[in-house]
Image (cartoon, rainbow, N blue to C red):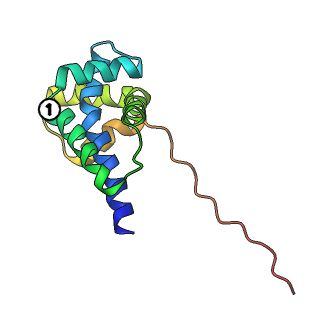
Amino acid sequence: MDRHFQRDEAIQVIVACLAGPFAESAFEGYLDPRDMAMNASDGNEGSSDYADAKRIYGELRFLMPRRPRWRRIEDRTARLVLDHWSAIEALAAHLLVKHDLQFDEALTIVAPHLPPMPAATPPERHPQPA
């Protein structure tokens, strides 16, 4: 079970590392996921976030012999950035003015740009035999 959590956490960290370079690519006008990935890798090869993502992915082979393909992770990250672009822009605009934000402030800024949470539905109940 522990290995399962390590794998999932590693993939989440990779996506988080790629999100910054991918957002920068989108800001520069690269809106196709493959173009975003190419620009992010060209501009950040060997630098912090992108290099960290590649290193973590390389280390995943020890935890996950059948790990997701790198391209799939890049596509997923690009989709997340593009799907939440208005929230990223709003947060960036506030950061340019204020320079740092508390978590609750950031949440207040991005909340109007995120899709509504689905309403919780109670589990189905099957009639019990009498």
**Quadrant housing residue 14:** top left
Amino acid type at circle 1 is Lys
Q: Nearer the viewer, residue 104 or 20?
A: 20
Q: What residue is shown with label 1? A: 98
Q: Nearer the viewer, residue 6 or 106?
A: 6
Number of numbered discs visible in the structure rendering? 1
Quarter in which the N terminus is drawn: bottom left
Q: Nearer the viewer, residue 59 or 1?
A: 59
Q: Residues within 10 Å of mark 1 (few under 14, many from 20)?
A: few
* Residue drawn at the location 51% of the way across and 42% of the way down: 116
In the picture as drawn, the residue positioned furthest to the bottom comes out as 130
Quarter in which the C terminus is drawn: bottom right
- Indicate the position of residue 38 as horizontal and vertical percent values: 30, 19
Looking at the image, is 30 positioned above or below residue 61? above
- Indicate the position of residue 43 as horizontal and vertical percent values: 19, 20
In the picture as drawn, the residue positioned furthest to the right comes out as 130
- Left or right, 111 with respect to 115, comes to left
Element at label 1: helix
Q: Nearer the viewer, residue 68 or 48?
A: 68
* Residue drawn at the location 30% of the way across and 50% of the way down: 60
In the picture as drawn, the residue positioned furthest to the top comes out as 29
* Residue drawn at the location 32% of the way across and 57% of the way down: 63
Looking at the image, is 112 positioned above or below residue 44? below
- Left or right, 74 with respect to 123, comes to left
**Quadrant housing residue 82:** top left
- Indicate the position of residue 49 as horizontal and vertical percent values: 18, 36
- Indicate the position of residue 33 as horizontal and vertical percent values: 40, 22
